Amino acid sequence: MARVNHWMGQEFAGASTRTASVTNPATGAVTAAVALASTHDVARVVDAAVAAFPAWRDTSLARRTQTLFGFRELLNTRKTELAELITDEHGKVIADAVAEVSRGQEVVEVACGIAQLLHGAVSENAATGVDVSTVRQPLGPVAVINPFNFPAMVPLWFVPVAIAAGNTVVLKPSEKTPSASIWLARLWEEAGLPAGVFNVVQGDAEAVDALLRHPAIEAVSFVGSTHVARHVYETAAVSGKRVQALGGAKNHMVVLPDADLDAAADAAVSAGYGSAGERCMAISVVVAVGPVADDLVTRIADRTRALSVGSGRRDVDMGPLVTREHRDRVASYVEATEAEGGKLVVDGRDWDVDGDASGFWLGPTLVDHVTPEMSVYRDEVFGPVLAVVRTESFDEALRLINANPYGNGTALFTSSGPAARRFQNEVQVGMVGINVPVPVPVAHHSFGGWKNSLFGDTHAHGAEGVRFFTRAKVVTSRWGAPSGGVQLGFPQNT
Ligand code: NAD
């Protein structure tokens, strides 16, 4: 049985004997045991990050940039290898796994420009003979804690920026999809990153809590479900750390009567069932406004029925869910919806699957006439279940979204400029798509939701990412100008 270990300059097993099983969701087979770190194991990995920090912080921008360019080249050449690892633990189809790596690679490419992004500011003669400069310095060792659904992209939202800015990193992957982290660690090593700058600690809640409480960890970037994000935010903040904790989502896609209904139906199906709905930016609710509803639901249903489901290694549209427990949890919402009065238009529970019978299968499911009281609307389902809510008006659709506790992503489909303008202006959601169903920002902008989808002040990557992983220092200096003698009054600038 393969074992997935921790990494600090090289693989190490740790002292803890606790492990968790890693499964291939397409076959149900246990493929590896992942180490679950104890608090003591976490402390050892953090020690490596602490030891590497002083030299890395003082490594020139030129050297750091060269390492990032090297990493980018290796990643670009070998991304299919990483994608296959992801598919075998997560279940998503290979093309989707390649796309996830490519989106992570975009952040590496932006971080290659760190010299430009870290430019400070200088004011010459801010007072007579006095210059003032602002510089941004790295924080120290930082922790990145990952969810199961993007084993490469989510770490790459944070790690390249943190490293480029001069920090050292401890990554805690999801115990369900741990192998990508070690693959990335080897790639960093091959790119010439010094030992201890990028480290991995495998584990569960015990490892997370040890990182949150470790005095040497300066900042925490967390991505996961809302209840854990809230816990991470509160615990890290109380421990005096900088923290950004990205949580769950419930993303609505509003379709107005003037929308191109074929484009909207294509978008709803792609964004609802891509990666089996296991994306924080998946569309889980289609809001059909006014008279379009019947026509729209028919078009979505036709497309949904045409989807193929099977092993992500085969030529199919959608793979399995990540674990049997998660598959059963998602299926329980389909059962509940029927009992609560929703209308099951497409039932994914008995799908004809191109894969092993023991895989964690659930086909795409479409439910119409969903109301905000139903559990399939209230909860984040995180699976291939698309709910249709019908509203009388655009106003009612906007109110629905703004009343929702989550605010990660949303989309509007329309041909009306004024409607689009009003939507983007009034909707209380962090990432908005206009005729774009999955509005994940490009890497040089920042990614983050509002409300229960993000706890903290700063979003991921882009300018906000650089700000998160650095702190400002302002230097006021006088060289050569006369001191002006003893003056006990508060210094005034003249
Ligand atoms: P999760 O919250 O179960 O796990 C996330 C991380 O927290 C894992 O590393 C896990 O080991 C750790 N963890 C789990 N329980 C913990 C506890 N009690 N105490 C401390 N640590 C704990 O999330 P998941 O199921 O792996 O991922 C899916 C969730 O992530 C969904 O809610 C999804 O919306 C969210 N997500 C959000 C974004 C975003 O950008 N907002 C992106 C991807 C995923």
Image (tube, rainbow, N blue to C red):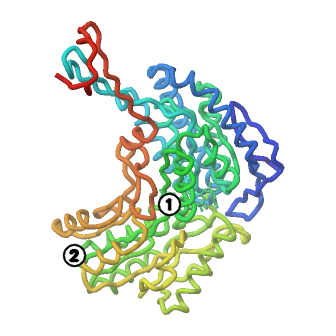
Q: Are marks 2 and 1 in contact (CB under 8 Å)?
A: no
Q: Position of residue 192 (x, y in %)?
A: 59, 24
Residue 388, above or below 51: below
Q: Amino acid at mark 2?
A: Asp
Q: Which mark is residue 258?
A: 2
| Mark 1 surroundings: few (<14), some (14-19) or many (≥20) residues within 10 A | many
Name the front one of labels 2 and 1.
1
488 vs 138: above or below? above
Ligand 1 position by quadrant: bottom right
Image disc number at residue 73? none
Q: Quadrant of the C terminus?
A: top left
Read off the residue under disc 1.
247
Q: Nearer the viewer, residue 411 or 274?
A: 411
Of pointers 2 and 1, the one earlier in the residue sequence: 1
Image coordinates for residue 490, horizontal then vertical, percent: 26, 27
Q: Tell me what residue is drawn at x 56 percent, y 45 percent.
A: 144
Q: CA–CA distance between discs 2 and 1?
A: 33 Å
User: In the visual, does 407 lie left or right of 63?
Assistant: left
Whether the residue under disc 1 has CB within 8 Å of ligand 1 = yes
Which is more toward the observer, 293 or 169?
169
Query: Dot 1 lies on which element?
Result: loop
Dot 2 falls on a residue whose secondary structure is loop
